[in-house]
Amino acid sequence: MPRGDREKRVKKLLAEMEKERGYVSLAKNYVATVDPDFMEAYNNLYNNGLRAGRALPVKYRELVAIAILSYRTREDAVYLHMKRALRHGATVQELLEAVETSIIPGGGPTFDTGTQALMRILEEEKEKKKKGGAGKNKR
């Protein structure tokens, strides 16, 4: 594939990923650049797993991902998926209850990871309000 076509393909892929997720990690940006075939396949898997399905809307799929990522103590990933869940209609209370639910099968570290990510979001909202930006999330 000519270099210009490949660059356009990578740019389009990264733009799609950014639009869907609200972010693209440095690792995924790198892989998209060096192996766009792999990243397109990964992106299709991601979209099939976390876009709205026939019965489960995006916000609920994100709540499941949040609980699993909390269990894996991936606080930054929990934070990013919480932000995405909020964009897809989840409330702060729903995020909290997903984290609270995760304590039973996952234990204290799972609960702490999820709670810390949620506290980070709430602190950001508080800072936005101080600076004059209105927070949009229901409580």
Image (tube, rainbow, N blue to C red):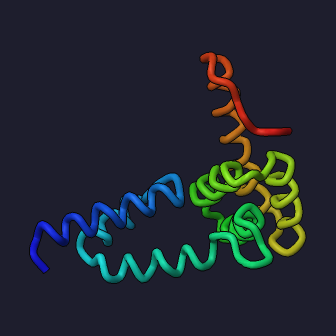
Q: Which of 29 and 102 is in front in this view?
A: 29
**From the viewer's perspective, is residue 69 above or below residue 94?**
below
**From the viewer's perspective, is residue 90 above or below residue 132?**
below
Name which residue lies at 45% across and 79% down: 42
Q: Which of 76 and 88 is in front in this view?
A: 88
Where on the picture, by quarter, is residue 60?
A: bottom right
Q: Nearer the viewer, residue 74 or 8?
A: 8
Q: Locate residue 9 relative to residue 86 in the image: left or right.
A: left
- State the count of labels: 0
Name which residue lies at 53% across and 81% down: 45
Name which residue lies at 72% across and 42% down: 119
The quadrant the C terminus occupies is: top right
**From the viewer's perspective, is residue 23 above or below residue 44?**
above
The quadrant the N terminus occupies is: bottom left
- Residue 99 locus on image (x, y percent): 81, 59
**From the viewer's perspective, is residue 80 above or below residue 4?**
above
- Residue 125 locus on image (x, y percent): 68, 32
Q: Locate residue 107 relative to residue 30 in the image: left or right.
A: right
- Residue 113 locus on image (x, y percent): 71, 57
